[in-house]
Amino acid sequence: MSQAFYRHLQTELDGIRAAGLYKAERIITTPQGAVVRTTDGREVINLCANNYLGLSSHPKVIEAAHEALRTHGFGLSSVRFICGTQDLHKELEQRIARFVGCEDAILYAAAFDANGGLFEPLLGEQDAIISDALNHASIIDGIRLCKAQRWRYEHNDLADLERCLKEASEKGARFKLVFTDGVFSMDGTIAQLDKIRELCDRYDALLGIDECHASGFLGKTGRGTPEYRGVFGKIDIITGTFGKALGGASGGFTAARREVVELLRQRSRPYLFSNTLAPAIAGASLAVLDLLEGSTELRDKLEANTAWFRQAIQAAGFEIKPGTHPIVPIMVYDAVKAQELSKRILELGIYAVGFFFPVVPKGQARIRVQISAVHEREHLEKAVAAFAQAGRELGLVK
Ligand SMILES: *Cc1c(COP(=O)(O)O)cnc(C)c1O
């Protein structure tokens, strides 16, 4: 019996490999940074981390983590409501809430948990959740766990969103919640929050967003997509991560009105039944917010790096998805070519991975580059030169 089970799993694995969908993990032996070393001893320029502001190995962040380890210990061995809440956690909740423009916030072990535990406690059968078709997997899973009726609108399509709002209203939904990624990670598309907010107001709906690829750098002072779109302080629910721009370790949050946060503390299952965020992460995240509230230097450098790279890679003959986000999808279209390009640039010292079906639609294969404030101009110049050489060799550019 059990032998059949393990054979079945091996067949599944072989199928994944045969379909060219197997995800191998590259092993890095250094801290995260502009340049990383892999187990073969080679140093490569890293263009695929979510380390947007370079904070994953920033000296002040590391020092704050050390300090929290010294003063608050390694871990709490408890969920929050038993004995897992320290002053650091309460302070971080206040600070992150203020940073993203909300009244209060609640911490989770990960943004995946923040989204997974968000919908079910707040909405029931009489309610409607209306979500973008390309929302992150954690949002999709969170919505599946909730009894509310579901609508899905075509990605980034306001007319289709309005259709859903109309239908949900006509069906007599008690409460309506529209939920979208602030930034979509495959294309770097920035949600049209100003227009979505208007529509939500017209149909008396709440608006929630996931700011994982925005908090810390999008908008003039890095407050995220609401600041970028001119609706800061006007979003009902914001989820986000400490695992990307805001330090890069792990941890997530949901920020909202006091009543929302208070009910989540009572009912949100990933909060109630999972260990508290490590004190070192809470302490380091506070240092991150000090840095970002004190100066816009890092997000300004990221913005300048992004603008430079977007222009230079196009000048080298590549087509990119237009936009302003540090996620820069370099379009190859063909999945095999995308893998060859990624392999060749790695040989040339540039680490950036290819994405193809089913992660992106068929025929939309690409290399997704992510720019960071930790990149210097020379890193980016080397990257563009490597793309140009590999692209010529593979007949992708002239
Ligand atoms: C990365 C990501 C998450 C998950 O964040 P973690 O803190 O790593 O769990 C959730 N939503 C979006 C949009 C993301 O990009």
Image (spheres, rainbow, N blue to C red):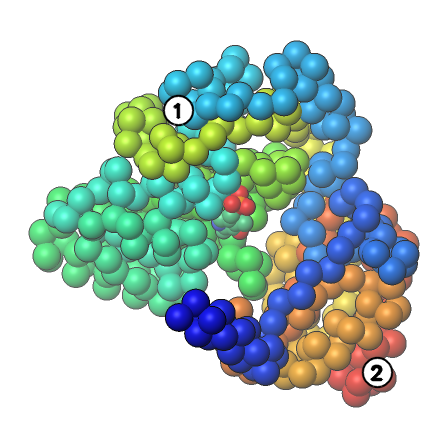
Identify the mark nearer the N-term, 2 or 1: 1
| Residue type, numbered disc 2 | Arg
| Residue type, numbered disc 1 | Glu
In the rendered image, residue 353, in percent from the top left (x then y), is placed at 70, 66
Q: Residues within 10 Å of mark 2 (few under 14, many from 20)?
A: some
Q: Residue at x 43, y 23 (%)?
A: 80
Can residue 103 be seen at all in this image of the molecule? yes
For mark 1, give the secondary structure: loop
In the rendered image, residue 146, in percent from the top left (x then y), is placed at 25, 48
Q: Residue at x 58, y 38 (%)?
A: 250
For mark 2, give the secondary structure: helix
Q: Residue at x 43, y 33 (%)?
A: 274
Rendered image quadrant of residue 81: top left
Q: Is 380 left, or right, of 256 in this rendering? A: right
Residue holding disc 1? 103
In the rendered image, residue 145, in percent from the top left (x then y), is placed at 28, 50
Rendered image quadrant of residue 163: bottom left
Rendered image quadrant of residue 48: bottom right
Residue holding disc 2? 392
